[in-house]
Image: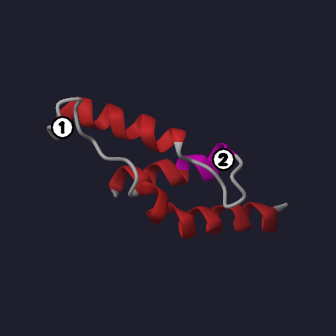
Amino acid sequence: MKRLSLLVVLSVFAAGPALAQSCKAVSAEGKPLAGAAKTSYMKKCCEDSAKSAEGKPLAGAAKASYVKKCMKG
């Protein structure tokens, strides 16, 4: 079980940067978002894109790790 968890977390880190790039925080008018609006948008986008290498939704620690990394990038 520990090996499976480790494999999931490592796959998240490998796929994270590619998926994190897809979240662009811009308004409907094309202007960049700032402050709380940007944070809220980025969190929702990162949570929605948290998927494993197989395309299954992440959960638990793997999802939290992915979202944290996505929010930084």
Other residues around mark 1 within 10 Å, as few (<14) / some (14–19) / many (≥20): few
Q: Name the residue type under label 2.
A: Leu
Across and down, in percent, residue 37 comes to 25, 30
Query: Which is nearer the eye, 71 or 48?
Result: 48
On the image, numbered disc 1 is attached to which residue?
Answer: 30
Across and down, in percent, residue 73 comes to 34, 58
- Up the image or down, 65 lies above or below 40; here it is below
Highlighted range, magenta: 57-64
Query: Which is nearer the eye, 31 or 66?
Result: 31
Query: Which is nearer the eye, 38 or 4?
Result: 38
> On the picture, is 18 further left or further right than 10?
left
Name the image colouring.
Answer: secondary structure
> On the picture, is 53 further left or further right than 24?
right
Does the magenta run of residues contain 15?
A: no
Element type at mark 2: loop
Dots 1 and 2: beta carbons under 8 Å? no
Quarter the N terminus occupies: bottom right
- Up the image or down, 71 lies above or below 44; here it is below
On the image, numbered disc 2 is attached to which residue?
Answer: 58
Across and down, in percent, residue 50 comes to 57, 47
Does the magenta run of residues contain 60?
A: yes
Who's the residue at 67% across and 44% down the image? Answer: 57
> On the picture, is 58 further left or further right than 67?
right
Q: Answer with mark 1 or mark 2, whichever residue precedes in sequence.
A: 1
Q: Name the residue type under label 1.
A: Gly
Other residues around mark 2 within 10 Å, as few (<14) / some (14–19) / many (≥20): many
